[in-house]
Image (cartoon, grey):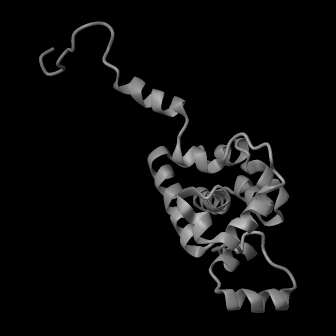
Amino acid sequence: MTHAPQKVSWIDDIAMTTEEKTTKGAEAGASSNFSCVPVELATKCRSLIESFHAIHGYIGLPDMLWLSDARDIIECDADLAEMFRSASRSRGAKRANESFLTIATAIVSLEVLARDFAGWGKRFPAAKREADKLLAGFPNRRAWLMDLYLFPPQANRRALADVLEPAATGSFKNPERT
């Protein structure tokens, strides 16, 4: 049995032109919280997130979303909350990871706009204002999700360095000669 990919309204909104958004908004009577995210930014954020998890694995992605302050954003958006719940219960890793990647992309894109990282806020000032409004309800953010991707915790770097540490017991033994 094949399942159709899960569609979420704001994902469709990201890919639409301004004219299509206006038409759809007039027809539907509402717009998505993430419709302000430029497609180019969402694409670049998705690429960053995928490359990070290609290196570090996808096992920590749900924890990154839930243990960072992204949890507050997820809980306040019905689409993200439903996607997170269904991904958490999913038995298929591929489908679950796809949903988690989509959530991470949306949140990181908002954070990049709100913090004007790499000039994205200056390039899209209206989108920055929208992102600021959306994130204004979370003034005491401790851990931005984008920081976890751009500046991984020191513990990850230390764990990698520990693997490369030479043995403390003395000389190197060549396995071919023993």
Q: Residue furthest right?
A: 29
Quarter of image, res 84: bottom right
Q: Is residue 57 left or right of residue 25?
A: left
Q: Nearer the viewer, residue 156 or 111?
A: 111
On the question of residue 6 being in view, the answer is no
Could you say where residue 58 lies in the image, as x and y percent from the top left? 55, 49
Q: Indicate the quadrant containing the N terminus: top left, top right, bottom left or bottom right.
A: bottom right
Report the number of numbered marks. 0
Q: Can residue 27 be seen? A: yes
Picture residue at 83% right of the left edge, 64% below the top:
78
Decide if residue 173 is on the left or right side of residue 105: left
Image position, residue 96 (x, y; %): 64, 58
- Check the image and report above or below for 12 versus 54: below
Tell me: 165 left or right of 98: left
Residue 149 left/right relative to 9: left
Q: Position of residue 171 (x, y in %)?
A: 22, 10
Q: Residue at x 79, y 59 (%)?
A: 81
Q: Nearer the viewer, residue 133 or 170?
A: 133
As rendered, which of 116 and 75 lies closer to the eye?
116
Q: Residue furthest top?
A: 169
Residue in the picture at 55% in, 62% down: 119
Write the residue at 53% across / 69% down: 43
Query: Residue 98, percent across and down?
Result: 60, 62
157 w.r.t. 71: above or below: above
Q: Nearer the viewer, residue 72 or 96?
A: 72
Q: Residue reaching furthest left?
A: 177
Query: Quadrant location of the C terminus?
Result: top left
Query: Would you identify the image quadrant in which residue 142 lies?
Result: top right
